Amino acid sequence: MEELKTHYDYIILGTGIQESILASALARNNKTVLHIDGNQFYGGNECSFNFSEFLEWIMNVQKNDNKAKQSTTTNDINKFYDSYHDIDIKILSGYDIPDNEPEITNRFALQNNKIAEEFLKQTQTSVEKDKLALLKDLIKDNRQFYISLLPKMAYSRGPFIDLLIKADLGNYLEFRSMEKTYIYNNDVFENVPCTKEDVFNSKQIKVIEKRKLMKFLTFVMNYRLEKESYEEYKDKPYSEYIKTYKLNPELQQVILQAINDSEEGLEDATTEEGLASTYRYLKSLGKWGNSPLICPLYGGGSEISQAFCRSCAVYGGVYMLDQKINSLEFKNNQYHLDCELKFTGDHLISSIDYLQDQSNIEITDYHKAIIITDKPLKKNIDISIYIIPPNTINNNKNRIMLIQQGYQANCCPKSKYIIYICTKATDTSKEEIKNVIQQLFEDKNDISEKNKLDEMEGENNENIKKDEEANDNNNKNDDDDDDDDEEEEEEEEEEEASKPKAYISVIFKQSIRKQKSLETKLDKTTLTIIDDMLPGISMETPVENALSIFRQLHPEIEEIYSKPQEEEEEKEEKQEEGQKEQEEQITNENEAVEEQTQ
Amino acid sequence: MSFSGRNDAAASNMKPIQVKLVLLGESAVGKSSIVLRFVNNEYQDNKEPTIGAAFLTQRCKLDDRIIKFEIWDTAGQERFHSLAPMYYRNAQAAVIVYDITKPASLEKAKTWVKELQRQANPNIVIALVGNKIDLANNRAVPYEEAEAYANENELLFFEASAKTGTNIIEVFTELAKKIPYEQILANNKNLNSRPGQNENGRVNLVDQDNNNQENGQCNC
């Protein structure tokens, strides 16, 4: 085995998206990179888990939280688990227990069932049979789940996509368009109109409003050329500026809450910030389908990390996961790292997870939930976003965002869906998330109702019809523009009839950490600390952040991914040439084998 | 028996079936050399550890099908057991390489077999390849021992030499024969069709930017 280098230009700790982008960029520019993660998996806080790993993660968070309460300190430098707290687990009750369980011989399946049992023992007061049966059913499809701790999507036009194409990572990553965005209004999720088509087809918007909305959207597309028209509002709240377009309150909410990628909506944004955010959203429309966002398949963040890490490895980067870091010191102008082996490095790039002195850190908490369900929130819609503005469910104070991903996102087995909920943590946020879950999901499997359904199917259908009629009457007021969408209407009402079941719902608090001041970031020119990524929907900010760090480290490099690509093209050409010849050989070979067998 | 013109014409009109093949095995057993011999029919002594090639592609004709192997090298990430789940995902074939002069490398190969059983698609076709038979004088792993292990675990088995080219094409030809194409085609038709067709909102970055024919991801 060839000798492993012990000294590197860069030691990088953590395999989050930003660290991985940097690793790839550095290796592509001939810097030697040692990339280390304390966890067994790629992605740091952007990781994703299959079902059994998810259960183990929950158990570890709980254990770590208890340890922290007893204030026992660990000597491990990796603080991954320290940013997750107060985890609450609820499992659907009344799940059908199969009469006779098939015997399982596969050792992986046996192992997984053991994890399910262990999970119930640790997190529930007792191991109930229905819950165990449910978990065993879910864990059967263990590897089809990609449950993400920080689900992200990407704008179809923006720095992230540009970077992927430049870095030639299109072959590693697959995407699907986000289908629809909804906003909660009058106890239902309404489709958010953003393209011209949407606006024209919308039956919720009156004709006059349509014109006003189009005027606004058209303006935003060119807002940078028309500075004078918003100059006096520039530093005033965006919400005030929007009022000048005389849109109705619902549409104002749509603009402030839904057509943007910010963590908390644009309620508190200035006009300049708001316009920039709306513009970013609108700019991405129409490139791939009707949606500005594309969703990375197989769990998102972790995939993106893996792609960049592989591209770093292809250019010589050395990878070590699952490393316990015993010590990390700076002496004689070098970083000395002691993990499975001992290394030195000229520079250190470290995720905030590995920062030893955590005193200079600013923490913003978010309350989040991960729910696995049997049905989508909207019929026949898979990858989608749901915004709950303030004051719409039990007087919620916070804006709450939901992301749904299912089979189409390759995150779940067929007919399962993952719903992620996120809101900024306040005194009431946890309660508000609980209310949202209660409002939108069923927490028990009502067997009696199911039996009833079987018995009196005909009657039941009639009931649904009655409901529909009642609802139609309610909706009449909005209906005066179009009337050819009745089918859709019916579908919506059916959904009302039964909510998705929350098989498992997990609520937790996540700390997003950031260094307090810029000066500390630059106190040593050889040390770069990477802040946590914010839980907003899109990928643009972290990508821009990583690229700007790279430019600070290497201002002399203009094009990060320029040269290597040419080389690859050459290779490709060479390959094509050799190919024909080879094909011949193989055909001949085939013939030979066939002859033999005859 | 030779391939008739009819077959050739039919084959050239067909879209190739893309097969992802992953390489596994201890460092320095000759994984990359085997691929380079297969793809470019070349060999370099004292090759530097793999740098700069994300993956190589090679087409083969098998009966009336064109198969396009997309061959993923470990890029050294196997060294500290840090291969990403992405590496194994949707791989339909694997070549696990050991060095016939190093018994430890066969033991390592066995752990990769286990890893594939844990991480990879259950229908993956695996070939175990004992490389470096040009160094048969220093043989330290008996043919029978490795063969017995391969049979037990239903793996294809070859001894080969990337240096001389012995048995290299056979490895890939035999793998190509065992791959369950009907299943791949059915899957492709279903949800997991390769990008490029854009149905169901699937997005292909590669096609968007470079529309010139063959570009890694083919249109099958």
Image (cartoon, rainbow, N blue to C red):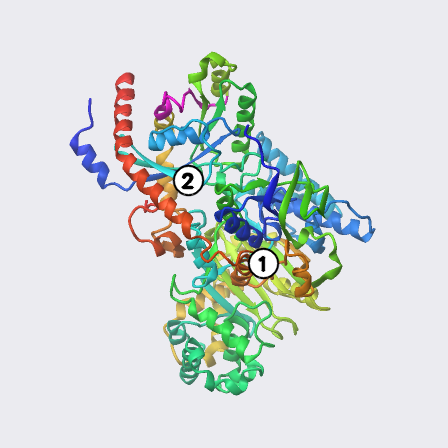
Q: Name the residue under label 2.
A: B55
Residue at the outermost front position: A332
The picture quadrant where one finds residue A324 is: top right
Q: Which residue is found at the position 46% from the left and 73% from the top?
A: A279
Q: Dividing the image into 4 quarters, which one contains the C terminus of chain A?
A: top left
**Is residue B168 one of those drawn in magenta?**
yes
Instruction: Tell me the chief SS of the magenta region.
Output: loop
Left-right relation of A368 to B184: right
Q: Which one is closest to the eye, mark 2 or mark 1?
A: 2
Dot 1 crowding, Cα within 10 Å, few <14, some 14–19, many 20+: many
Q: Mark 2 lies on which chain?
A: B
Mark 2 secondary-structure assignment: strand
The picture quadrant where one finds residue B174 is: top left
Q: Mark 1 lies on which chain?
A: A
Query: Residue A459 at x, y = what percent?
Result: 49, 61
Q: Distance between the residues labelled 2 and 1?
A: 35 Å
Q: Which residue is found at the position 38% from the left and 33% from the top?
A: B180
Dot 2 crowding, Cα within 10 Å, few <14, some 14–19, many 20+: some
**Is residue A71 one of those drawn in magenta?**
no
Amino acid type at image mark 1: Tyr
Is residue B217 visible to us here? no
Query: Residue A106 at x, y = what percent?
Result: 57, 31
For residue A75, above or below residue A240: above
Q: Which residue is found at the position 47% from the left and 81% from the top?
A: A477
> What range of the chain is rendered magenta?
B153-170
For residue A184, above or below residue A501: below
Closer-to-camera residue (B3/A479): B3
Q: Name the residue under label 1.
A: A420
Closer-to-camera residue (A58/A492): A58
